[in-house]
Amino acid sequence: MDGLQTERLTLRRWREADRPIFHALNSDPVIMRFFDKRLGREEADATMDRWNAGLDDNGMSFLAAERRRDGAVIGTIGLAPITEDAYRFAPTVQIGWRLVPDAEGQGYASEGARACLAHGFDVLRLPDIVAQCVVENRSSEKVMLRLGMTLRGTFDHPKVSAATHPHLVRHSLYGLTAEDWRETQHGSASRPG
Protein backbone atom coordinates (compact mmCIF):
# COMPACT_ATOMS: atom_id res chain seq x y z
CA MET A 1 0.00 0.00 0.00
CA ASP A 2 2.88 2.33 0.75
CA GLY A 3 3.39 4.61 -2.26
CA LEU A 4 -0.06 4.33 -3.87
CA GLN A 5 -0.42 7.15 -6.39
CA THR A 6 -3.41 8.93 -7.84
CA GLU A 7 -3.52 11.87 -10.21
CA ARG A 8 -2.97 14.34 -7.33
CA LEU A 9 -1.87 12.28 -4.32
CA THR A 10 0.76 9.90 -3.04
CA LEU A 11 -0.40 7.73 -0.14
CA ARG A 12 2.62 6.71 1.87
CA ARG A 13 4.07 5.63 5.21
CA TRP A 14 4.34 8.33 7.86
CA ARG A 15 7.85 9.78 8.27
CA GLU A 16 9.64 11.37 11.23
CA ALA A 17 9.24 14.79 9.64
CA ASP A 18 5.46 14.26 9.55
CA ARG A 19 5.04 14.18 13.33
CA PRO A 20 3.85 17.83 13.65
CA ILE A 21 1.20 17.47 10.93
CA PHE A 22 0.17 14.07 12.30
CA HIS A 23 -0.33 15.68 15.71
CA ALA A 24 -2.36 18.50 14.12
CA LEU A 25 -4.59 15.99 12.31
CA ASN A 26 -5.33 14.32 15.63
CA SER A 27 -5.62 17.37 17.89
CA ASP A 28 -7.21 20.17 15.85
CA PRO A 29 -10.79 20.81 17.08
CA VAL A 30 -12.12 21.43 13.55
CA ILE A 31 -10.52 18.32 12.03
CA MET A 32 -11.53 16.21 15.05
CA ARG A 33 -15.08 17.56 15.40
CA PHE A 34 -16.59 14.09 14.83
CA PHE A 35 -14.22 12.29 17.23
CA ASP A 36 -14.61 12.00 21.00
CA LYS A 37 -10.94 12.52 21.81
CA ARG A 38 -8.15 14.75 20.59
CA LEU A 39 -4.62 13.42 21.00
CA GLY A 40 -1.73 15.06 22.80
CA ARG A 41 1.69 14.95 21.19
CA GLU A 42 2.83 11.75 22.94
CA GLU A 43 -0.42 9.95 22.08
CA ALA A 44 -0.20 11.16 18.48
CA ASP A 45 3.41 9.95 18.19
CA ALA A 46 2.42 6.52 19.56
CA THR A 47 -0.53 6.35 17.14
CA MET A 48 1.68 7.24 14.17
CA ASP A 49 4.13 4.50 15.18
CA ARG A 50 1.24 2.04 15.56
CA TRP A 51 -0.13 2.92 12.11
CA ASN A 52 3.30 2.37 10.53
CA ALA A 53 3.59 -0.95 12.37
CA GLY A 54 0.16 -1.90 11.02
CA LEU A 55 1.44 -1.31 7.52
CA ASP A 56 4.33 -3.70 8.20
CA ASP A 57 2.14 -6.30 9.94
CA ASN A 58 -1.03 -6.24 7.83
CA GLY A 59 0.00 -4.60 4.57
CA MET A 60 -2.49 -1.81 5.22
CA SER A 61 -2.81 1.32 7.34
CA PHE A 62 -4.06 4.88 7.42
CA LEU A 63 -1.39 6.57 5.31
CA ALA A 64 -0.10 10.10 4.87
CA ALA A 65 -1.95 11.75 1.98
CA GLU A 66 0.73 13.82 0.29
CA ARG A 67 -0.29 16.28 -2.41
CA ARG A 68 1.94 15.62 -5.40
CA ARG A 69 2.16 19.18 -6.71
CA ASP A 70 3.77 20.60 -3.56
CA GLY A 71 4.60 17.65 -1.27
CA ALA A 72 2.26 18.91 1.47
CA VAL A 73 0.68 16.29 3.73
CA ILE A 74 -3.01 17.22 3.62
CA GLY A 75 -4.44 14.39 5.68
CA THR A 76 -4.69 10.65 6.08
CA ILE A 77 -6.44 8.08 3.91
CA GLY A 78 -6.23 4.32 4.17
CA LEU A 79 -7.41 0.88 5.19
CA ALA A 80 -7.23 -0.82 8.59
CA PRO A 81 -8.54 -4.07 10.05
CA ILE A 82 -11.33 -4.08 12.62
CA THR A 83 -10.91 -7.17 14.76
CA GLU A 84 -12.42 -6.25 18.12
CA ASP A 85 -15.50 -8.20 19.17
CA ALA A 86 -17.11 -4.97 20.43
CA TYR A 87 -17.94 -4.15 16.81
CA ARG A 88 -20.85 -6.32 15.69
CA PHE A 89 -19.55 -6.27 12.10
CA ALA A 90 -16.01 -7.46 12.96
CA PRO A 91 -13.81 -8.92 11.69
CA THR A 92 -13.57 -6.75 8.61
CA VAL A 93 -11.49 -3.97 7.06
CA GLN A 94 -12.46 -0.33 7.19
CA ILE A 95 -11.58 2.55 4.92
CA GLY A 96 -11.21 6.04 6.33
CA TRP A 97 -9.95 9.55 5.68
CA ARG A 98 -9.34 12.81 7.47
CA LEU A 99 -8.16 16.02 5.78
CA VAL A 100 -6.92 19.43 6.86
CA PRO A 101 -9.70 22.02 6.43
CA ASP A 102 -8.20 23.79 3.40
CA ALA A 103 -8.05 20.46 1.52
CA GLU A 104 -11.70 19.54 2.14
CA GLY A 105 -14.27 19.75 -0.63
CA GLN A 106 -11.76 19.26 -3.46
CA GLY A 107 -12.26 15.56 -4.11
CA TYR A 108 -9.06 14.39 -2.41
CA ALA A 109 -10.85 11.99 -0.04
CA SER A 110 -12.72 10.29 -2.88
CA GLU A 111 -9.63 10.14 -5.07
CA GLY A 112 -7.41 8.61 -2.40
CA ALA A 113 -10.13 6.28 -1.14
CA ARG A 114 -10.71 4.89 -4.66
CA ALA A 115 -7.02 3.96 -4.83
CA CYS A 116 -7.30 2.26 -1.43
CA LEU A 117 -10.40 0.34 -2.51
CA ALA A 118 -8.65 -0.82 -5.66
CA HIS A 119 -5.66 -1.97 -3.61
CA GLY A 120 -7.87 -3.66 -1.04
CA PHE A 121 -10.00 -5.55 -3.54
CA ASP A 122 -7.55 -6.15 -6.39
CA VAL A 123 -4.25 -6.67 -4.53
CA LEU A 124 -5.18 -7.75 -1.00
CA ARG A 125 -8.21 -9.67 -2.33
CA LEU A 126 -10.46 -8.49 0.50
CA PRO A 127 -14.07 -9.69 0.23
CA ASP A 128 -15.63 -6.60 1.82
CA ILE A 129 -14.68 -3.11 3.02
CA VAL A 130 -16.71 -0.93 5.38
CA ALA A 131 -16.71 2.73 6.36
CA GLN A 132 -18.22 4.36 9.41
CA CYS A 133 -18.96 7.89 10.51
CA VAL A 134 -21.05 9.85 13.00
CA VAL A 135 -24.57 10.07 11.52
CA GLU A 136 -24.32 13.89 11.29
CA ASN A 137 -21.10 13.71 9.25
CA ARG A 138 -22.76 14.36 5.90
CA SER A 139 -19.52 15.15 4.05
CA SER A 140 -18.08 11.71 4.84
CA GLU A 141 -21.37 10.05 3.92
CA LYS A 142 -21.25 11.80 0.53
CA VAL A 143 -17.77 10.36 -0.06
CA MET A 144 -18.99 6.88 0.87
CA LEU A 145 -21.85 7.17 -1.61
CA ARG A 146 -19.50 8.48 -4.33
CA LEU A 147 -17.36 5.38 -3.77
CA GLY A 148 -20.36 3.15 -4.46
CA MET A 149 -20.81 2.11 -0.84
CA THR A 150 -24.29 1.42 0.50
CA LEU A 151 -25.78 2.09 3.91
CA ARG A 152 -25.90 -1.08 5.99
CA GLY A 153 -27.42 0.48 9.09
CA THR A 154 -26.56 2.48 12.17
CA PHE A 155 -24.95 1.46 15.44
CA ASP A 156 -23.80 2.91 18.73
CA HIS A 157 -20.01 3.18 18.66
CA PRO A 158 -18.69 0.90 21.42
CA LYS A 159 -15.79 3.22 22.28
CA VAL A 160 -17.73 6.50 22.56
CA SER A 161 -19.29 7.44 25.89
CA ALA A 162 -22.92 8.53 25.78
CA ALA A 163 -22.34 10.32 29.08
CA THR A 164 -19.65 12.65 27.72
CA HIS A 165 -20.28 12.71 23.95
CA PRO A 166 -23.92 11.78 23.28
CA HIS A 167 -23.89 13.51 19.86
CA LEU A 168 -21.02 11.26 18.68
CA VAL A 169 -22.37 7.86 19.72
CA ARG A 170 -24.63 7.02 16.77
CA HIS A 171 -22.70 5.98 13.65
CA SER A 172 -23.67 5.05 10.12
CA LEU A 173 -22.12 1.93 8.65
CA TYR A 174 -21.53 1.75 4.90
CA GLY A 175 -20.05 -1.14 2.97
CA LEU A 176 -18.91 -2.38 -0.40
CA THR A 177 -18.27 -5.96 -1.47
CA ALA A 178 -15.52 -7.03 -3.84
CA GLU A 179 -18.19 -8.28 -6.23
CA ASP A 180 -19.97 -4.92 -6.29
CA TRP A 181 -16.62 -3.11 -6.68
CA ARG A 182 -15.67 -5.21 -9.70
CA GLU A 183 -19.11 -4.72 -11.23
CA THR A 184 -18.84 -0.94 -10.94
CA GLN A 185 -15.29 -0.97 -12.32
CA HIS A 186 -16.22 -3.07 -15.34
CA GLY A 187 -19.41 -1.10 -15.83
CA SER A 188 -17.62 2.26 -15.76
CA ALA A 189 -14.88 0.96 -18.07
CA SER A 190 -17.41 -0.08 -20.69
CA ARG A 191 -19.48 3.11 -20.54
CA PRO A 192 -18.44 5.91 -22.90
CA GLY A 193 -17.40 9.25 -21.38
Image: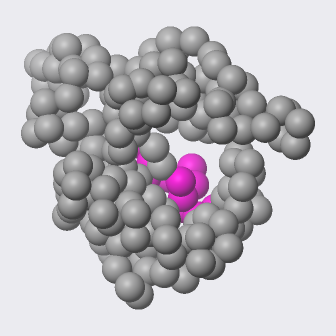
Which residue sits at x=45%, y=19%? Answer: 89
- Write the residue at 34% across / 80% down: 15
Where's residue 98, x and y in %? 53, 54
Q: Residue furthest right?
A: 163
The quadrant of the image that shows the C terminus is top left
Q: Where does the image place residue 72, in percent across and percent down from the top left?
A: 42, 77
Report the quarter where the N terminus lies. bottom left
* 65 to the left or right of 163: left
Q: Quadrant of residue 180?
A: top left
- Residue 75 image point, x, y percent: 48, 63
Does residue 116 sit above or below 53 in this rendering?
above
Closer to the camera in the image, 88 or 30: 88
Q: Is residue 8 left or right of residue 57?
A: right
**Residue at the extreme bottom of the image, as rendered:** 17
The number of numbered discs placed on residues in the rendered structure image is 0
Residue 102 showing in the rendered view:
no
Residue at 48% in and 26% down? 85
Residue 155, percent across and down? 64, 19
Q: Is 157 situated left or right of 182 in this image? A: right
Residue 11 image-quadrant placement: bottom left
The magenta stretch is 98-111
State whether residue 142 is above or below residue 63: above
Q: Is residue 126 visible?
A: yes
The answer to whether residue 153 is magenta is: no
Identify which residue, 107 or 25, lies in the foreground. Answer: 25
Q: Residue at x 72, y 38 (%)?
A: 160
Above/below status of 88 relative to 28: above
- Residue in the foreground of this view, choosing between 156 and 187: 156
In the foreground, 50 or 8: 50
